[in-house]
Image (cartoon, rainbow, N blue to C red):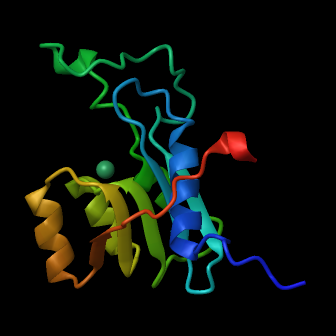
């Protein structure tokens, strides 16, 4: 008997984990997941967008179109990348690859740069020219992944 040939590659594996992680998000309009992996393909961290620790998901509004800024989710939500960068299970993330379901915003990009991440792979693009500029200036590769296979959990 020979080995299976239809196993998934690393990029497919980690991006599907990022997608799975995004399913934990309570955000009704945007679910983001993030996985950080080192050069040995070992997972260093994983995260999704959510409220800060200790704040109930029910105590903060999840809307985004209220006139009063404080009645929208934006001032409160911790982005998936930030959660992953903070909750790492290793001392540092130097030269790691960050897989994310979405293109990073400018605030996450700053922290990604400060963490010495060397490469970003994302699925969904939302333009942020400040992110783009900072990533170019720091030579961090940022590539839209052509996901070959989205795993259906029902198949497991
Ligand atoms: Zn962000």
Q: Can you name the residue that lies furthest to the front here?
A: 1
| Above or below for 93 versus 101 | below
Residue drawn at the location 60% of the way across and 75% of the way down: 91
The spot of residue 156 in percent (x, y) is: 75, 47
Query: Seen in the image, is 38 located left or right of residue 2?
Result: left
The spot of residue 32 in percent (x, y) is: 42, 44
Q: Quadrant of residue 110?
A: bottom left
Report the front residue among 23 and 154. Answer: 154
Q: Can you name the residue that lies furthest to the right here?
A: 1
Report the front residue among 5 and 132. Answer: 5
Residue drawn at the location 58% of the way across and 75% of the way down: 9
Residue drawn at the location 12% of the way across and 13% of the way down: 67
User: For the image shown, how many numbered marks are present on the structure?
Assistant: 0
The spot of residue 41 in percent (x, y) is: 62, 79
| Above or below for 106 versus 91 | above
The spot of residue 105 in percent (x, y) is: 24, 53
| Above or below for 110 versus 40 | above
Image quadrant occupied by the N terminus: bottom right
Query: Seen in the image, is 153 located left or right of residue 77?
Result: right
Would residue 87 be seen by someone viewing this image from the given angle? no
Report the front residue among 53 and 112. Answer: 112
Query: Seen in the image, is 13 located left or right of residue 115?
Result: right
Query: Seen in the image, is 42 located left or right of residue 126?
Result: right
Residue drawn at the location 11% of the way across and 70% of the way down: 133
Would residue 26 be seen by someone viewing this image from the given angle? yes
């Amino acid at each position: 008997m020979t080995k299976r040939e239809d196993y998934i590659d690393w990029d497919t594996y980690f991006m599907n984990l990022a997608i799975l992680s995004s399913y934990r998000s309570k955000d009704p309009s945007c679910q983001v997941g993030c996985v950080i992996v080192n050069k040995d393909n070992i997972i260093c961290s994983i995260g999704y967008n959510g409220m800060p620790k200790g704040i109930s998901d029910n105590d903060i509004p999840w809307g985004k179109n209220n006139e009063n800024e404080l009645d929208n989710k934006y001032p409160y939500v911790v982005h998936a990348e930030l959660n992953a960068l903070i909750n790492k299970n290793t001392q540092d993330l130097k030269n790691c690859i960050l897989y994310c379901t979405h293109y990073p915003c400018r605030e996450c990009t700053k922290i990604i740069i400060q963490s010495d991440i060397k490469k970003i792979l994302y699925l969904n693009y939302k333009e942020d020219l400040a992110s783009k500029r900072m990533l170019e200036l720091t030579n961090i590769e940022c590539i839209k992944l052509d996901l070959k296979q989205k795993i259906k959990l029902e198949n497991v």
